[in-house]
Amino acid sequence: MITVLAGGVGAARYLAGLLQIVDADDITAIVNTGDDTWLHGLRVCPDLDTITYTLAGAVNPETGWGLVGETWVALGELRAYEEARAWFALGDRDIGTHLYRTGRLAEGATLTDITAGITRRWGLDLRLVPMTEDEVATRFTLADGGEEIGFQDYFVGHHHSVAVSAVRFAGIDSATPSPGVLDAIAAATRIVVAPSNPIVSIGPVLAVPGIRDAIAARRDDVVAVSPIIAGGTVKGPADRLLVELGHEASVVGVARLYADVVGTLVIDDADAHLADDVEAEGVRCVVAPTLMHGPPESAALARVTLA
Amino acid sequence: MITVLAGGVGAARYLAGLLQIVDADDITAIVNTGDDTWLHGLRVCPDLDTITYTLAGAVNPETGWGLVGETWVALGELRAYEEARAWFALGDRDIGTHLYRTGRLAEGATLTDITAGITRRWGLDLRLVPMTEDEVATRFTLADGGEEIGFQDYFVGHHHSVAVSAVRFAGIDSATPSPGVLDAIAAATRIVVAPSNPIVSIGPVLAVPGIRDAIAARRDDVVAVSPIIAGGTVKGPADRLLVELGHEASVVGVARLYADVVGTLVIDDADAHLADDVEAEGVRCVVAPTLMHGPPESAALARVTLA
């Protein structure tokens, strides 16, 4: 039984590799929901959907999110009403997912059950679990002016290109882990922290009361993959966010952030010279190729995390 | 200044005729919202949208509702999740409207303002006003078994082909007329009750506290067009509903229902032999062609109602 703490694109690719070498039934992914948002009345869960679409082989290969063969009719109409309202790319196929999720939420279904319905439709056998059933919203304070904005406003509206002075997870204090989350952590033979943004993807998962302690109690069996390679990221703003929030945009910075919960950090060959510095943070260091160009690299990385 | 009480398709066609002979700026339509519903998290307002799309020349000519050139991608995806959930035809273009409306509702905009935004996008200059800003839901008690169901469940889910023993408008007691509604009634030189279902289209409008009295006070200037022609309807279940609820499915039955608020009833040539019976109900009767096959007939009918 393998349990994975997961954000979006990086986690999806890691999980695709893991599925090549482990039975899907033995995999539980605990997924960040801090990016989730209400858009035009619909509940949108970017990380859950990115993982689902990726593992189903249905993700748009050019963007890494959204569905392949997507159409944009509804968004075009929304734009005709008010250009500014169409800032978030909601494709028609993707809207089908949001309609299903929002309709079931309105009927009182839990996000965990709804997510199981979504993965079933896509033929997935692993277990995707939102970190919490409660609404948590990652929010950013802008360095310039101090305005606080939501995750999607930062990520999509501002293309994550504005400096940030603080991040918080609104609602986290009263959130509880989804049913099965703590069990999946306790029962895992290996816990993997996927190569996702440590601040805004893994950060919210660890911040759900109870999860960080549960992971820390399994520290020797916890392996993280650094999303930082040679001081940068494959995708997204993790490197800039780390610096803006006073951390180091390096595998050493990642090791420091995770030191209390992670026993082993996998870093890329490009950072081999920093292995000793990682271990100096009290974290065992494994050096391996971590770039996932395709299925073979994903599977190889998965093998490293289970070794 | 002409004020029209309006339901869906019949009212849309009547208004299309009225727009040919009266300045759009001089027309206010007070529209039924009892059919409105929440679907998968989206706020759907069938009568408002049918009127808008029809007057914009964008309505699907084959159905009389929905948009021409519609696509069904989102609904197809919803069906893939759960067949039964896709019972209501939500096209992708139409979803654009619902996203706009629901998003603005979530931000606190009023349905009146949102509707003005929608008609503006479609280039309409008449004023469409929801009968109320409050949520009112038309509900049907099934004759067989006594179960109560919502309007769309009756109309779409059951294709309005089940017998009904009662109709009520949930929420109506605490509803108030939208801003401008009572003024539009007081200021009108002519008030027209469009050829819409008297029970479930015009019924809810008149049932909003304050509206029936306001219309009754203008009774001499109120002209209704009978939606019943030769005991039947052009579209929809008005004839059966009238009978099931103890009324007569005839122009006389319509006259009786409207007698307290309507000074004149326009009936179709096919019902000319019932003109005296209509007048016996205390309602002046005008006989004219009321079938609206196209723009000329709609304009001619509009002329009759203003004569």
Image: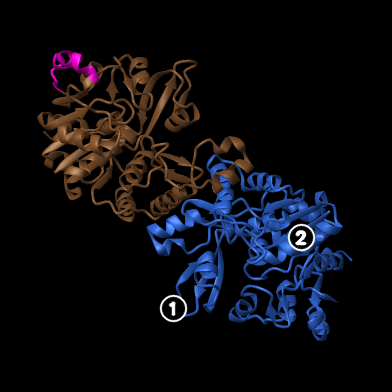
Chain colours: A blue, B brown
Indicate the quadrant where residue A31 lies. bottom right
Give the residue number, with chain letter if any, for mark 1: A145
Q: Earlier in the sequence, mark 1 or mark 2?
A: 2
Chain to which the residue tagged by mark 1 belongs: A
Image position, residue A3 (x, y; %)? 78, 57
Dot 1 alpha-carbon crowd within 10 angstroms: few under 14, some 14 to 19, many 20 or more: few
Instruction: Mark 1 and mark 2 in contact? Answer it, CB < 8 Å.
Output: no
Residue B142, compared with residue B46, is above or below; it is above
Residue B99 appears left or right of A225: left
Image position, residue A243 (x, y; %)? 62, 81
Residue A130, compared with residue B222, is above or below; it is below
Residue A89 appears left or right of B221: right
Dot 2 alpha-carbon crowd within 10 angstroms: few under 14, some 14 to 19, many 20 or more: many
Label tally: 2
Image position, residue A272 (x, y; %)? 82, 83
Evaluate whether label 1 is on the same chain as label 2: yes
* Identity of the residue drawn at 40% across and 58% down: A80
Q: Secondary structure at mark 2?
A: helix
Residue A300 appears left or right of B226: right
The CA distance from mark 1 to mark 2 is 39 Å
Chain to which the residue tagged by mark 2 belongs: A
Q: Nearer the viewer, residue B279 or A258?
A: B279
Q: Secondary structure at mark 1?
A: loop
Give the residue number, with chain letter if any, for mark 2: A15
Q: Amino acid at mark 1?
A: Gly
Q: Magenta segment range?
A: B270-286
